[in-house]
Amino acid sequence: MLSANRIRPEVSTASSRRTRDVWSTTTRTLGKVLRNSLLSTAIAWIFAFCCSVGNVFSGRGADAQSTQEFLVAKMLWFHYFFCAATVSIFLSLLLTEQPAGLVPTTRSPLAHWSRRMAWLTSPYFFVVCKLLSVVLESAKTAKASVYFTHICFYVFVGCTDVQARFLYRSETARGQVRTRQQLMRHQRRLSERPDRKPLPPERRRFVRVLLEDLPLVASAVFATAYVHTVSAIKIATQWDLAPFALCSISLKLLLQEMAKGLLTRKRRTPNMRSMAITVAAPTILVDTQLRTVLLCQDNASMTVVVSLLLAIAEVCVRVVKTAYVQWHVHRLDAQRHSPFAISLAAKSATKIAHVHVAPVRTTSSLRLRVHRLLSLHAAEVYADMYAEYIAMGCSYGILFFFGAHAKYQLGNGETPAASRWTNASITGLQLALEVVVDLVACALEIRRGIDLERFNQDDAFLAVFMVAVALVNVHTRLNGYMSTSTS
């Protein structure tokens, strides 16, 4: 009886400590997501303001500028912002490395890598800038020109990626060691097999980088086509809004599952950055369109009701997904410890002596599948949180700067001042609901074993990457809603 009384306080203490750890991780993760989302939204707002002005050197307002002049200026604004964000993304990765031969007290690594990246990427910047200026002046429609810009910036991202990898291999201490090890391994294999091909040249490396970055441009092109399709749909009543919201949520879930399926088929488990990139981009692009359509409705009460329903649906979907992942993990664990599998492996091991390593390989394979499943779900949860906050900020910013713009078809029939106040109130309500949803859902997911803490280690990279996604987000929406009479 005395021992039972001693155990109860220990169990209670462990449970309370576990609860404190869960809420501590939840608040820390949500705080970083909110901070990075605020940064992305602020830069996206600055970009939207610059686009609303158009050509600042013309001395005329946006309504007095010609369509082609305004279009070229808007595309160049996106070029400036996106190139800076792209270089910053790879700069954040290089900042984790120490430059070879650089004394830490003589020069800051930030200044060193910034200077090197600016020098290597500036030729691509000016080439793309000139190409945009020439081609867009002859473009017939704004909707067609945005696809051309996606191709240009896809090539710029590939060139910047190649230069960043070159700096890592040639000018970082760890990169030089890995390069020497790679050369030694390759020379040893050449001595064993003289017919083996040499190391791939820079051109093949560039093609490989383009293939690795292909999901990003595919997401951007899909989002552009989606915006162009949705902008042609007229939503007048709640009976039109409900199917649209349902289809948007279904599309987002489908894209998430397709992205996770793509990552699951890879031989190696992708890192946190790759998972967050592949899952976050389509999620943010679809969510922003839904939020923008909600804010454009004439009936504010209907928008509030739909926002509440979306918050409830998000909690339910996240809880159900986490429960399914946990059930799948238990199923894989049961397969790993299955008596049938063990006896089958033992029988095969008695027949052939060298097959005794097969059970170990199978166990490690199942363990790898469990790790990949939990990591992909954590990436999806993390991307979902970013998507909601960035979508809110971008949708309100688009309506704030372009709701009464002469070259755009936006607004809900109210005066600009009244519309901005209504949209601000609704966005504030959506933000409060989303914070409550994330607090509850994150706590439940962390308690069920979903590790969100690992994403906080790549905080600088994710912050800059979300800025780039927010810029693409606003850029795509602006081209989709440009007035047909001016495009």
Image (spheres, helix red, strand yellow):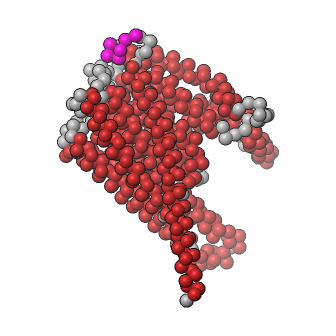
User: Residue 375, can we see it?
Assistant: no
Q: Please tell me whether residue 95 is drawn above or below residue 408 in the rendered image.
A: below
Q: Which residue is at 54% across, 79% downward?
A: 8
Residue at position x 55%, y 50% in the image: 455
In the image, residue 155 lies at what x, y percent?
A: 53, 29
Q: State left or right for residue 138 relative to residue 197.
A: left
From the viewer's side, name the closer residue of 274 and 478: 478
> Which residue lies most toward the bottom here?
1
Please state the total of marks drawn on the protein image.
0
Q: Nearer the viewer, residue 69 or 392?
A: 392
* Quadrant, the N terminus: bottom right
Q: Residue at x 76, y 39 (%)?
A: 173
Q: Position of residue 189 (x, y in %)?
A: 77, 46
Whole-percent x and y of residue 389? 42, 43
Query: Is the residue 342 above or below the residue 49 in the image?
Result: below
Position of the C terminus by quadrant: top left
Magenta span of residues: 59-64
Task: For residue 2, say whether it is visible.
Answer: yes
Quarter-wise, where is residue 55 in the image? top left
Indicate yes or no whether the magenta region holds residue 63: yes
- Taking the image as shown, residue 229 lies to the left or right of residue 120, namely left
Q: Residue 181, position in %: x, y?
A: 77, 44
Q: Can you say whether 93 is above or below 87 in the image?
A: below
Place residue 50 in its image quadrant: top left
Q: Does 233 lie within the magenta span?
A: no
Q: Residue at x 34, y 22 (%)?
A: 141
